[in-house]
Amino acid sequence: MARRYWNEEIETIGPAARRRLENERLAEQIAYNWAASPFYRAKLEGAGLTPRRIRAVEDLALVPFTEKTEIAESQRTGSLLGATRCAPVDRIVRIQATGGTTGQPMRIGLTRQDVEDYGEMGARALWAMGCRPGDVVFECMNYNLYAGGVSDHMTFETVGAATIPFGVGQSERLLQMMAALEDELCLWSTPSYAMRLAGLARDKDIDPRTLRLRKGFFSGEAGMQVPGFRERIEATWGMVARDQYGTGELGLHSGECEHRNGVHFGGVGFAVAELIDPDTGDVLPFDDGRQGEVVYTSIRREACPLMRMRSHDLMQVFTETCACGRTSFRLRILGRSDDMFIVKGVNVFPQSVQAVVLTLAPRLNGEFRVVLDRPPPIDYAVPVEVEVARDVPEAHHADLAAELVERLRKELNFTAAARLTEAGSIASEAKTRRVVRTYRADERAP
Ligand SMILES: [Zn+2]
């Protein structure tokens, strides 16, 4: 079988050749952004830069970040694609919206070339995930506006898979259709949907394993990284489950190979990734095992190129060549950087704090909030607010707070200042923010 999306030149490219390719395309892209977008030009000028100054990926450290909120804001007044649009509208052939995890959805446009590049990048990721011509893929993502629908669908077609645009919200019909087919099948969905579908099948006395779903391509959630979850999906369906990562702004770009040691970045030649310290914005060395917030810059994009766009996604990267032969870096998503804080060089995630808070249930109900009121470094007792159960007498509150502080110190190695609040004061109907920063974003420690 032709290994169309095992592009030897790209997949096994050495570090020096990759850097040459990236530097060359980066310089072209920055000059293009400068000429085409007054917004990007102002950003560069504001930092005292002209395109000639940006000749290599390392020079990106001089370029100011772009926040998604800036793009969303520029679209709010009615502008179709906002301030980062670099191609005229008569060259745009597709417009989609990003999920808006920050609460600010934004529109992204693609030219015909961008669509082709999106397909190529996604196809590399899918090939790594074991997708091949001959696969019959049920695409069960949301097709309404979202990149996971039409655009990701097209990456499967690029590979040559027989792709069924199923969408969401018709699970019973999906089960009927699967049951009526004698072919081996594949599923493209979120991991939680795969489990929901299995539950629905069992409700109808169908053993999920009889539906012959043999490959699961999963995206959109961290589910595959939750211990035991992948094994459950695989055992439930009798399938091989592979993980994928992408963003609405950049596209489906990374997929997990058979060695399952993180997802391979498939965007070589299309985008570069940097790692930064989420609190200071300083660039971190991109070396094996390093953790940081990822920042993306397009190096071949016409309609809406990204220029140092902060993802606020925290990841760990692996740069050693994989046993599969791919030389691109691998990544593992750790969580949203907005929700993480660093104490004495150690990353603390809300889930870890929650786990400790829950050891004091039912006296504490598990609702909590970390309030950072001063800029980093955190050399002070970290304020942690927790909801206390209604039946705990006030006289016991001080002891309970002291117990929590002691457990946080022992388990997570930081000193907290615990404050007990009444039940219902922290949790909200929307997703509760677990880490709140009350200092101004431009404040820095002296
Ligand atoms: Zn690999």
Image (cartoon, rainbow, N blue to C red):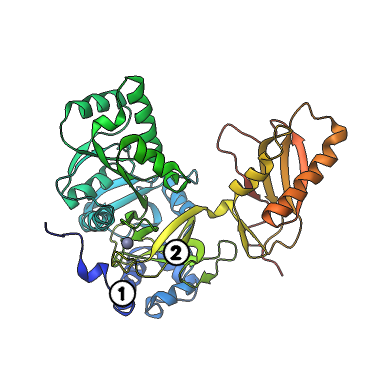
Q: In which quarter of the image is the N terminus?
A: bottom left
Q: Where is residue 313 in the image (x, y as percent from the top left)?
A: 48, 55
Disc 1 is placed on an element classified as: helix
Q: Given this view, does label 2 or label 1 mark the residue nearer the observer?
A: 2
Relative to 76, is 366 on the left or the right?
right
Is 386 placed above or below 330 here? above
Q: Where is residue 45 in the image (x, y as percent from the top left)?
A: 46, 72
Is 218 placed above or below 291 here? above
Q: Nearer the viewer, residue 286 or 295?
A: 286
Q: Which amino acid does label 1 sit on?
A: Arg
Q: Which amino acid does label 2 sit on?
A: Val
Question: What distance separates the C-alpha of mark 2 from that of mark 1?
Answer: 17 Å
Specify whether tag 2 is near ligand 1 (CB below 8 Å): no
Q: Position of residue 10 (x, y in %)?
A: 25, 69
Q: Nearer the viewer, residue 213 or 164?
A: 213
Residue drawn 35% across the image and 30% down it: 198
Residue drawn 38% across the image and 33% down it: 195
Q: Identify the residue under disc 2.
A: 317
> Label 1 crowding class (10 Å Cα cut-off): few <14, some 14-19, many 20+?
some
| Residue found at the very far right of the displayed protein | 395
Is residue 159 among the parts visible in the rendering? yes
Specify whether tag 1 is near ligand 1 (CB below 8 Å): no
Disc 2 is placed on an element classified as: strand
Residue drawn 26% across the image and 55% down it: 118
Q: Quadrant of the C terminus?
A: bottom right
Rendered-image quarter of ligand 1: bottom left
Q: Quadrant of residue 234?
A: top left
Label drawn at residue 18? 1
- Contact (Cβ within 8 Å) of mark 2 with mark 1: no
Is 241 placed above or below 204 here? below
| Residue found at the very far left of the displayed protein | 1
